[in-house]
């Protein structure tokens, strides 16, 4: 016998299949569905309101692991035969599905608290309950207020805060970075993703923008060397033996760089283990009056706050918790660095794409923006260049929920860790 949760999930989907007019009233997020196949079908409906039942069946046959296969989808549609499918109860069906999601999430958080009692898990539990309580099914109730706010914004300066990356081509492409987003910077090893993220961190920090750079792989001392090389223009290799390799002019430049860096609104936190709750604690320690940007280097080195069955499930949970954090805390944006799969290396064109994200499709779903980094000179070392220390770094915006996609070029001077 089908349980209540599965019944209402199938009922919602059955009504969406049968009644096209209900598709504009569908407000559930895919994550609210317990069955991953239901979530994937819901995601397809969100992306394409004009789908036909035949198209859904075709997708199920082509991708049974995603949509459950022909029999699974056909069974959902057959609810129309077994039960009286009434379109007038669609909102109540959605409310029941959302309520079941809330109960599952609260139960999960309580178990996390019981397995690791600490102030951090108490904070996470309370924050999660507060977030869940705010979730409601309200099809059109706020439409008038939203339109009123939009109209007033035409005459008032209520624009969304935008922070420029100071990478000229990238800012022209995406028009800067908005707050309350989860953004991904992904690349294969040695492309320069840490340097790119660190340069962006230095570019965006200001009196009004506080930055924390979480480094799970590199010590704060090593990261500070990169920053001082960047600010001073003294090559990185000289920092290994400064007494033997640095001139007095170099020392003067580094001394000035130390003064510059000490006044920057950026802090590096090195730790062998970062969890979503650890990131939450760091954010809660930041000023409430500033815009907050957190860089995490990198996501695959993070651990979940709770034990998961496998690494894919763990990375999915980490991604989801980081996304929740950006939605909960005002004026917070997170940049999470991510490794890419080795499949990139097997192709002739080694420019990465969405399918190369390692270990979780959840990252693709949660991210507002995904930027892939690519250096042609890394793969084509025999080509002559005017400056052997310079690389052209391609920043490929593969996903951008609120703007255009495309490619921007950043000049990467490897000896001094500078990017422009």
Image: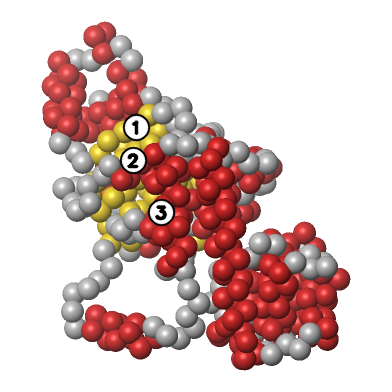
Residue lying at 50% horizontally and 61% vertically, measured from the top left: 399
Residue at numbered disc 3: 127
Inter-mark Cα distance, 1 to 2? 9 Å
Q: Is residue 397 visible?
A: no
Q: In which quadrant of the rendered image does the N terminus lie?
A: bottom right
Q: Which of the two marks, 3 or 1, is nearer to us in this view?
A: 3
Tell which of 25 and 410 is nearer to you.
25
**Could you give the CA–CA distance between mark 3 and mark 1, rounded to whole angstroms?**
24 Å
Q: Secondary structure at mark 3?
A: helix
Query: Where residue 269 is drawn, which disc sits there?
Result: 1
- In this rendering, the answer to whether 133 lies above or below 213 is below
- Along the horizontal axis of the image, is 104 left or right of 11? left
Instruction: Look at 73% across and 72% down and name the residue there.
Output: 7
Sequence-wise, which precedes: disc 1 or disc 2?
1
The residue at the far top in this view is 244
Q: Position of residue 375 (x, y in %)?
A: 49, 42
Q: In the figure, 169 relative to 189: above or below? A: below
Q: Percent x, y for residue 415?
A: 35, 29
Mark 2 to mark 3 CA distance (whole Å): 15 Å
Quarter of the figure with the C terminus: top left
Q: Residue furthest right?
A: 71
> Is there CB contact under 8 Å for labels 1 and 2?
yes
**Residue of label 2:** 282
Residue 412 in picture, x, y percent from top left: 37, 40
Left or right of 260 in this view: 132? right
Answer whether labels 2 and 3 touch (C-beta < 8 Å): no
Q: Of callouts 3 and 1, which one flags the residue occurring earlier in the amino acid sequence?
A: 3
Residue at 51% x, 36% y is 116
Tell me: residue 263, above or below residue 81.
Answer: above
Q: Nearer the viewer, mark 2 or mark 3?
A: 3
What is the quadrant of residue 278 in the picture?
top left
């Amino acid at each position: 016998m089908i349980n209540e949760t599965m019944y209402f999930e199938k009922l919602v989907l059955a009504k969406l299949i049968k009644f096209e007019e209900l598709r504009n009233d569908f407000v559930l997020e895919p994550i609210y569905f317990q069955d991953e196949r239901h979530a994937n079908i819901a995601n397809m409906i969100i992306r394409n309101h004009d789908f036909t039942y035949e198209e859904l069946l075709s997708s199920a046959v082509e991708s049974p692991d995603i949509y459950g296969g022909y029999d699974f989808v056909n069974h959902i549609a057959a609810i129309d035969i077994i039960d009286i499918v009434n379109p007038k109860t669609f909102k109540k069906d959605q409310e029941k599905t959302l309520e079941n999601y809330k109960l599952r999430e609260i139960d999960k958080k309580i178990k996390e608290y019981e397995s690791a009692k600490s102030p951090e898990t108490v904070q996470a539990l309370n924050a999660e309950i507060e977030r869940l309580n705010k979730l409601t099914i309200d099809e059109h109730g706020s439409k008038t207020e939203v339109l009123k706010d939009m109209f007033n914004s035409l005459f008032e300066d209520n624009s969304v805060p935008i922070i420029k990356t100071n990478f000229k081509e990238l800012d022209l492409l995406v028009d800067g970075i908005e707050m309350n987003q989860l953004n991904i910077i992904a690349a294969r090893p040695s492309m320069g993703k840490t340097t790119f993220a660190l340069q962006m961190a230095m570019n965006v920090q200001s009196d009004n923008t506080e930055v924390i750079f979480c480094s799970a792989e590199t010590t704060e001392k090593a990261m500070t060397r990169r920053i001082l090389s960047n600010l001073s223009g003294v090559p990185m290799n000289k920092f290994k033996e400064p007494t033997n390799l640095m001139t007095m002019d170099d020392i003067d430049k580094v001394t000035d760089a130390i003064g510059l860096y000490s006044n920057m609104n950026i802090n590096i936190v090195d730790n062998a283990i970062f969890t979503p709750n650890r990131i939450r604690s760091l954010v809660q320690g930041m000023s409430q009056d500033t815009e907050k940007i957190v860089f995490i280097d990198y996501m695959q080195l993070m651990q979940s706050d709770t034990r998961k069955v496998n690494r894919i499930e763990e990375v999915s949970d980490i991604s989801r918790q980081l996304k929740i954090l950006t939605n909960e805390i005002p004026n917070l944006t997170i940049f999470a660095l991510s490794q890419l799969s080795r499949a990139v290396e097997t192709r002739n064109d080694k420019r990465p794409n969405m399918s190369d994200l390692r270990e979780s499709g959840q990252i693709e779903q949660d991210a507002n923006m995904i930027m892939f980094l690519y250096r042609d000179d890394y793969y084509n070392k025999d080509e002559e260049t005017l400056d052997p220390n310079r690389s052209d770094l391609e920043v490929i915006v593969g996903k951008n929920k609120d703007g255009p996609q495309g490619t921007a070029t950043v000049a990467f001077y490897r000896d001094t860790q500078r990017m422009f």
